[in-house]
Amino acid sequence: MKLTGRLIGMPHTVRLTIHRATVTTIHDVDTTSDVWICPGLVDIQNNGYHGYDVRAPDVDEHTIQRLVTALWEQGVTAVCPTVTTGPEDRIVASLRAIAAARRLDPLLARAIPCAHVEGPHLSAEDGPRGAHDPGSIRPPDTAEFGRWQRASGDVVGIVTLAPELPGASRYIDEVVRGGGVAAIGHTAADPRDVTAAVSAGARLSTHLGNGAHARIARHPNYIWEQLAQDRLMASFIADGHHLPAATLSAMVRAKGHGRSILVSDSVALAGSPPGAYTGPMGAPVELSADGRLSLAGTDLLAGAARGLRECMAWAVYGAGLRLSQVVAMASANPARLLGGRRISRRSIRVGGSADLTLVRADPAREDIEVIATIVGGVIVHRTADAPIEGAA
């Protein structure tokens, strides 16, 4: 299989050859192209999309399979299906469905490096708790984490928790020793709690700037502390609603492009037409044409309803970040966070893995179009004009 386009961030056009799951050659060619060849997009926080809900009571492996297939059309080559706060049996049911989906097909296993559990060990305070079920918030429990992993075959690779809770440092150590990523999120922590979590091995701030109080001390506070911690990467929801443009821009500059990650944090209503719906918690919600999901009759957010591709477009055209930076924040950076045990898609090079997303930037429409998605050398999505030769 041969692809033609420009490697992201490079001025000239190349022809890239893929054999099986590996990039075998990259040669310059004397032609022009408006297609960018990017490392495959990786969404480490996704609760659902196009009606498929990771947290649904009836979730099974086919729900997860259809979710992944829908995300392939959006350029996402790998996703961490995200399970949020709930009773233990509900969390375990979702984790088992994710694990079962990975067993359906080697390509699905490649596309689902691990699951992300966001909660239930979060702050119970209004604001930091966000939309998580207050009745299911509970302290960190390493025994419960062990039950999750035994029930799902160690599918949990990321856990988000509030570091100020009793036992948090021990819990973080347990996650890290098992090869997982411990993340700080939905927290009302004192800065000293953040420092203690980082010392215990926490490596990520989950959707920094959200899951927070509406008003906090000017300084010090838990947002500044996380921005200043060089050992923490930070994820951001760049949907145009969760963070203002100036806030996203300033946070990315403070954290550094190499330590910043874009996530969708999308719910099942993402990809749906505008209208009135019932939200994940059973409350009436409204989805606007610009992708804002709000509690009906209010301006309160009820979740994220834009996919990673749309978040990338807003980060470029709404927040003014460079396309090459945004692509790295949605591909190489999350892959580096997960590490080689889970995923190895960090750069496009000879001998590297053939997990790629081909896109075309459209400044007139302020959009990014996905031309093709390739997972493990297999084309899982392509448009009619995709510059690909030698593949069915």
Image: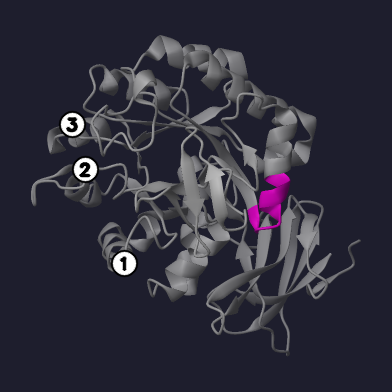
Drawn side of residue 284 relative to residue 66, left or right = left
Q: Sequence-wise, which precedes: disc 2 or disc 3? A: 3
Residue 265 visible in rendering: no
The residues bearing labels 2 and 3 have C-alpha atoms spaced at a distance of 17 Å
Q: Toward the viewer: 244 or 43?
A: 244
Q: Helix, strand, or loop for circle 1? A: helix
Q: Which residue is mark 3?
A: 193
Which quadrant does the N terminus fall into?
bottom right
Drawn side of residue 66 relative to residue 215, left or right = right
Highlighted magenta segment, given as a residue range: 68-76
Drawn side of residue 202 relative to residue 372, left or right = left
Q: Which residue is mark 1?
A: 249
Q: Amino acid at mark 3?
A: Asp
The residues bearing labels 1 and 3 have C-alpha atoms spaced at a distance of 26 Å
Q: Toward the viewer: 302 or 23?
A: 302
Q: Which mark identifies residue 213? A: 2
Which quadrant does the C terminus fall into?
bottom right
**Dot 1: within a 10 Å radius of its alpha carbon, few (fewer than 14), some, or many (20 or more) residues?**
some
Q: Sequence-wise, which precedes: disc 1 or disc 2? A: 2
